[in-house]
Image (cartoon, helix red, strand yellow):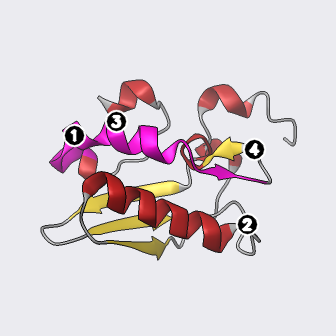
Amino acid sequence: MAESVIPNLPDWKIIQTNPEKVNDLIEGLSGITDPEMGLSIIQLGLVRDIELKPDNVLITMILTTPYCPYGPSMLESTRKKVETILTIPTSINYGAISWEPGMMEKDLRDDWGLF
Protein backbone atom coordinates (compact mmCIF):
# COMPACT_ATOMS: atom_id res chain seq x y z
CA MET A 1 0.00 0.00 0.00
CA ALA A 2 1.04 3.65 -0.31
CA GLU A 3 2.42 4.00 3.21
CA SER A 4 5.19 1.52 2.43
CA VAL A 5 6.17 3.41 -0.73
CA ILE A 6 6.15 6.92 0.78
CA PRO A 7 6.54 6.87 4.57
CA ASN A 8 5.53 10.52 5.05
CA LEU A 9 2.49 10.36 2.78
CA PRO A 10 -0.29 12.48 4.27
CA ASP A 11 -3.57 10.75 5.02
CA TRP A 12 -5.13 11.20 1.59
CA LYS A 13 -8.82 10.29 1.51
CA ILE A 14 -8.24 8.26 -1.65
CA ILE A 15 -6.05 5.85 0.36
CA GLN A 16 -9.18 4.74 2.21
CA THR A 17 -11.66 4.87 -0.69
CA ASN A 18 -9.57 3.72 -3.67
CA PRO A 19 -6.20 2.35 -2.50
CA GLU A 20 -5.61 0.66 -5.86
CA LYS A 21 -5.13 4.11 -7.46
CA VAL A 22 -2.61 5.48 -4.96
CA ASN A 23 0.58 4.02 -6.44
CA ASP A 24 -0.29 5.36 -9.91
CA LEU A 25 -0.85 8.80 -8.37
CA ILE A 26 2.43 8.68 -6.46
CA GLU A 27 4.33 7.58 -9.56
CA GLY A 28 2.74 10.24 -11.76
CA LEU A 29 3.07 13.08 -9.27
CA SER A 30 6.67 12.17 -8.46
CA GLY A 31 7.57 13.57 -11.89
CA ILE A 32 6.46 17.08 -10.91
CA THR A 33 9.30 18.93 -9.20
CA ASP A 34 9.74 22.22 -7.41
CA PRO A 35 12.43 23.80 -9.62
CA GLU A 36 13.95 25.78 -6.75
CA MET A 37 14.18 22.82 -4.40
CA GLY A 38 15.00 20.17 -7.00
CA LEU A 39 12.66 17.69 -5.31
CA SER A 40 9.31 16.28 -6.33
CA ILE A 41 6.05 17.51 -4.86
CA ILE A 42 5.66 14.03 -3.35
CA GLN A 43 9.11 14.12 -1.70
CA LEU A 44 8.34 17.57 -0.28
CA GLY A 45 4.90 16.52 0.99
CA LEU A 46 3.12 19.30 -0.91
CA VAL A 47 0.11 17.19 -1.94
CA ARG A 48 -1.81 17.14 1.33
CA ASP A 49 -4.96 15.34 0.16
CA ILE A 50 -6.56 13.70 -2.85
CA GLU A 51 -10.25 12.98 -2.61
CA LEU A 52 -12.06 11.03 -5.33
CA LYS A 53 -15.72 12.00 -5.44
CA PRO A 54 -18.37 10.50 -7.75
CA ASP A 55 -18.02 13.21 -10.40
CA ASN A 56 -14.68 14.91 -9.68
CA VAL A 57 -11.39 14.85 -7.81
CA LEU A 58 -10.36 17.45 -5.26
CA ILE A 59 -6.66 17.91 -4.52
CA THR A 60 -5.45 19.91 -1.55
CA MET A 61 -1.94 21.17 -2.14
CA ILE A 62 0.43 23.63 -0.51
CA LEU A 63 3.64 25.31 -1.65
CA THR A 64 6.99 25.64 0.11
CA THR A 65 6.42 29.40 0.30
CA PRO A 66 3.20 31.36 -0.27
CA TYR A 67 4.79 33.43 -3.04
CA CYS A 68 6.61 30.65 -4.83
CA PRO A 69 7.21 31.91 -8.38
CA TYR A 70 6.67 28.38 -9.72
CA GLY A 71 3.51 27.82 -7.65
CA PRO A 72 0.88 28.42 -10.33
CA SER A 73 2.71 26.13 -12.75
CA MET A 74 3.15 23.35 -10.16
CA LEU A 75 -0.50 23.59 -9.09
CA GLU A 76 -1.72 23.35 -12.67
CA SER A 77 0.70 20.54 -13.55
CA THR A 78 -0.56 18.61 -10.53
CA ARG A 79 -4.18 19.16 -11.49
CA LYS A 80 -3.58 18.03 -15.07
CA LYS A 81 -1.55 14.97 -14.02
CA VAL A 82 -4.23 13.74 -11.60
CA GLU A 83 -6.95 14.39 -14.15
CA THR A 84 -5.00 12.32 -16.69
CA ILE A 85 -4.35 9.46 -14.26
CA LEU A 86 -7.90 9.23 -12.89
CA THR A 87 -9.68 10.38 -16.08
CA ILE A 88 -12.14 12.54 -14.16
CA PRO A 89 -12.43 16.35 -13.83
CA THR A 90 -10.01 17.58 -11.18
CA SER A 91 -9.70 20.78 -9.17
CA ILE A 92 -7.10 22.14 -6.76
CA ASN A 93 -7.70 23.63 -3.35
CA TYR A 94 -4.78 25.63 -1.98
CA GLY A 95 -4.29 24.34 1.57
CA ALA A 96 -4.42 26.57 4.63
CA ILE A 97 -1.38 25.09 6.38
CA SER A 98 2.21 26.25 5.90
CA TRP A 99 4.87 23.93 4.59
CA GLU A 100 7.67 22.87 6.90
CA PRO A 101 10.64 20.54 6.38
CA GLY A 102 9.04 17.88 8.60
CA MET A 103 6.59 17.23 5.75
CA MET A 104 9.42 15.95 3.55
CA GLU A 105 10.34 12.30 3.18
CA LYS A 106 12.22 11.37 6.34
CA ASP A 107 15.38 10.30 4.49
CA LEU A 108 15.65 13.71 2.81
CA ARG A 109 15.35 15.79 5.98
CA ASP A 110 18.86 14.99 7.19
CA ASP A 111 20.52 15.80 3.86
CA TRP A 112 18.66 19.00 3.20
CA GLY A 113 21.22 21.32 4.75
CA LEU A 114 19.09 24.36 5.56
CA PHE A 115 18.06 23.18 9.03
Element type at mark 4: loop
Task: State yes or no: discs 2 and 1 in contact (Cβ < 8 Å).
Answer: no
Report helix, strand or loop for mark 2: loop
The part of the image, by quadrant, that contains residue 109 is top right
Q: Position of residue 42 (x, y in %)?
A: 54, 44
Q: Earlier in the sequence, mark 2 or mark 1?
A: 1
* 3 or 2: tag closer to the N-terminus: 3
For the residues labelled 3 and 4, the Cα–Cα distance comes to 22 Å
Task: Give the alpha-carbon distance from disc 3 to disc 2, as whole Å.
Answer: 27 Å
Q: Which residue is mark 4?
A: 38
Q: Residue at x 12, y 68 (%)?
A: 54
Residue type indicated by callout 1 = Pro
**Residue 65, numbered circle:** 2
Q: Is residue 31 visible in the rendered structure shown here?
A: yes
In the image, which disc is placed on residue 4?
Answer: none
Q: What is the three-letter code of the residue carrying label 4?
A: Gly
Q: Residue at x 70, y 73 (%)?
A: 66
Circle 4 Cα neighbour tier, 10 Å, few/some/many (<14 / 14–19 / ≥20):
few
Q: How many marks?
A: 4
